[in-house]
Image (spheres, rainbow, N blue to C red):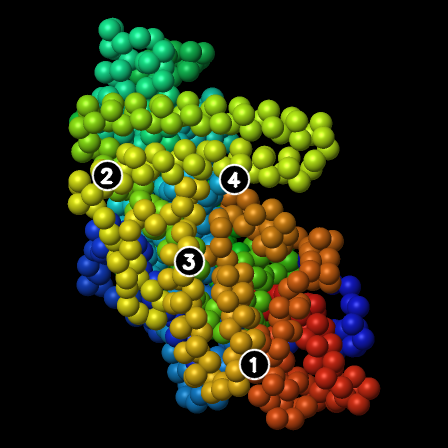
Amino acid sequence: MKRYIIPSVYFLSGCISSLVSFGVASEKSPIPVVESVHLTKVQKSVSIKPAPKAVVNRLSSSKRIDAILASSWKEAGVKPNAPISDDVFLRRVYLDVVGRIPTYKEAIRFMDSKGSGKRAALIDELLASEGYVNHFHNLWADILRFNARAAANQNITPFYAEWVREALRKNMPYDQFVRELITAQGQAWDNGAVGYYTRDRGMPLDHMANTVRIFLGTRLECAQCHDHPFDDWSQMDFFHMAAFTYGVNPSGSNYGMLSTAQRSVREAKDMPEQKRKDLGAAMTEITRAVRNNYSVSHRSSLPKLPHDYRYDDAKPSSLVQPGTMFGADPDEIPWEQRVGVYADWMTSKENSLFTKTISNRLWQKVMGIGLFPAVDQFTAYSEASHPELMAFLEEQMIESGYDMKAFLRVILNSQVYQREATVVDPVPGEIYQFAGPTLRRMTAEQIWDSIVALVNPTPELENWKRDQLFHLRMAEQEAMQKVLGEYDEKDLVKAAGSIAKLQKELKAEEEALRLQIVAAQKASDKKKVSELSREVSQMRTRLRTKVVEMVFHPGMKKSGVETVAMALPGGGAVEVSPMMMDGSGTNSAELRKLQDEAEKLMVEKEMDQLGMSDSKARSQYLSFRRSSMKSMIRAAHLESPAPPGHFLREFGQSDRDTIENANDEASVPQALALLNGTTFSQISNQQSELYRNVAEAQTPESKIDTLFLSLLTRKPTNREKQLLLSHIEERGGSLYQDTTFALLNGQEFWFVQ
């Protein structure tokens, strides 16, 4: 099996790592609610269809899973793994459901609780938590390839990710989740699900192949060019499927009357050519402020077969009508209903592949391996390792109304889930008998989020300042697009004339500055060159600022869109202008002041709750918390994907270019990131959540207990504790840092047992 080994450099790392046996064994933080800034002043919520009357009986269903596997074990002569202890269960279920290790306080709370039903109660609590939303957001971010840096997606992806989070938060049934993605229309600020189509903008054939792969677990890519060599799908099947959504059109921003004004200027025969060019350039500059706000609509377009199509069931280059891969083809349908018919067929209870795919995916998510090992490579010849269990899971998914939490709850409450992990990798080609879950290394997100929980006392807190900035900027975009839709054509031409004049003035000023730069370079005056170059780089910002002031501000006043409600952490809201940005599109000094005051108030409440009165200590804590709330936040609230070089990328986070291409392989850069990076210094900071808990412990013994419970979710063995205490005199306070480093770099920390 794969092992993750980190070189040891601290004094005690080697001896502690050798003692920490491999495979051995809350209080909820207040989460400030940060709502989206939106022109309507109302958070657009995800609507959920009513739950079905049939409710899955968790206990009996979990027992049925165990009974099916028990029969399989007997037939195969396999002995199931032993049941796990409470501490192993606690760590495993936190990692599987909320994607991070439990905090010290969460661990103590569970271990101190009594009663035979405490495991089931914890499962329910975690499934209802914001941690579940964050963790399963990461799963769907990989599957759906959230990529804010992809062309034209910077204004779409944040809304798309927010839509998915809200669907998870409200437990949207999976069939509704898929249907709303497939049928999405409009603009991102009204319906974030449109990100599903803008992600593959301009690639309708590839988009259809991705849809079938994600939701039906079937690879059709080969059939785009020829009949599938290893399955029953033909090239014609591929184009029939593509016809359903070929007319979905992620188009650019709606420029309203500006488009009419542009056309009238182009067609004005009595206008001098130079003036026409100047006005055209000015209008292009006006549109720059609202670009990349793609809107998804449906058209009547149909795909054509390739010009070299070589099969005898149709002629090359002929149009193809919609048709399903299997099941009855729909009758001829109006083009505006194609996508809806496609979504109905895709998500139907009669579509076995649809139910099978999500059931297998979620089983694999918590057990480490699927009943079909490959979640997206079903063929006509695929067979489940345990057909009876697969059929039962499909039945559970349907009976629950495609309730993913209810489905997960059944698995998590089963005895097989709560057995020791199998530490030997499954042999390819051999049936894995599920004597217990498989041992897995944490994903990049699980590692990062666990570190966040060691540092940040509010690990589920959103990146609220960044989110507010984005939503305010998009409120500005929505307002400006509304303005262009209501502007008078003549007024736009007049405004464009003013912009054209300004462009000429700035161009002349820029040329003069460049001449001065040349002169400063000849004189070897580096300081002057830098100052002048900075002025040149600010020309674009100055032009954008003037366009907003001259065109959009007057239009906003005229249209009555002047303020939006911005929610603040801890409650309350303020009315702000959606134009509260500077010319470069970043938050203004006024907005930064509002955010800083809200953040300071939130941290001051934390300090009051901690009973912190010393002014120096409060100042240090405030500085630390402001830093941690910016950098030490969960992966779900960081840029998607994280930038190259970030901890997440070093540890295998997907680049979101292809579906689920994350990896969990160990590497030298990972070891160096832990040995030489800033991660350990953040964890061992005296203001971190970990070290504040260590500081509260009264004795060396209890401090060591705190470290083990915080990092490994178990208490140290007597041998481990005695070894550590034997070095207390020579190491002093450094002993706790040594221990932290050793535990953090040991194998037990990195694996989901």
Q: Which residue carries the number 1 mark? A: 616
Residue sitting at x 68%, y 75%: 740
Q: Residue furthest top?
A: 269
**Amino acid type of the residue tagged 1 in the rendering:** Lys
Q: Nearer the viewer, residue 151 or 500?
A: 500
Dot 3 or dot 2: first in sequence order is 2
Apparent side of residue 353 relative to residue 437 in the rendered image (left or right): left
Determine whether 132 is above or below 352 in the image: below
**Amino acid type of the residue tagged 4 in the rendering:** Asp
Q: Residues within 10 Å of mark 4 (few under 14, many from 20)?
A: some
Tag in front: 2 or 1: 2
Where is residue 168 shown, x and y percent of the image?
35, 58
Where is residue 372 shown, x and y percent of the image?
49, 50
Q: Are marks 4 and 2 in contact (CB under 8 Å)?
A: no
Dot 4 or dot 2: first in sequence order is 2
Apparent side of residue 639 relative to residue 522 in the rendered image (left or right): left
Q: Residue 76 appears in which quarter of the rendering?
A: bottom right
Q: Say which quadrant the N terminus sits in.
A: bottom right
Cα separation between marks 4 and 2: 42 Å
Cα separation between marks 3 and 2: 25 Å
Where is residue 596 shown, x and y percent of the image?
43, 64
Where is residue 153 shown, x and y percent of the image?
42, 39
Apparent side of residue 263 relative to residue 712 in the rendered image (left or right): left
Determine whether 140 is above or below 704 in the image: above
Residue sitting at x 49%, y 49%: 640
Determine whether 612 is above or below 584 in the image: below
Q: Which residue carries the number 4 mark? A: 657
Q: Which residue carries the number 2 mark? A: 554
Cα separation between marks 2 and 1: 49 Å
Q: Which residue carries the number 3 mark? A: 592
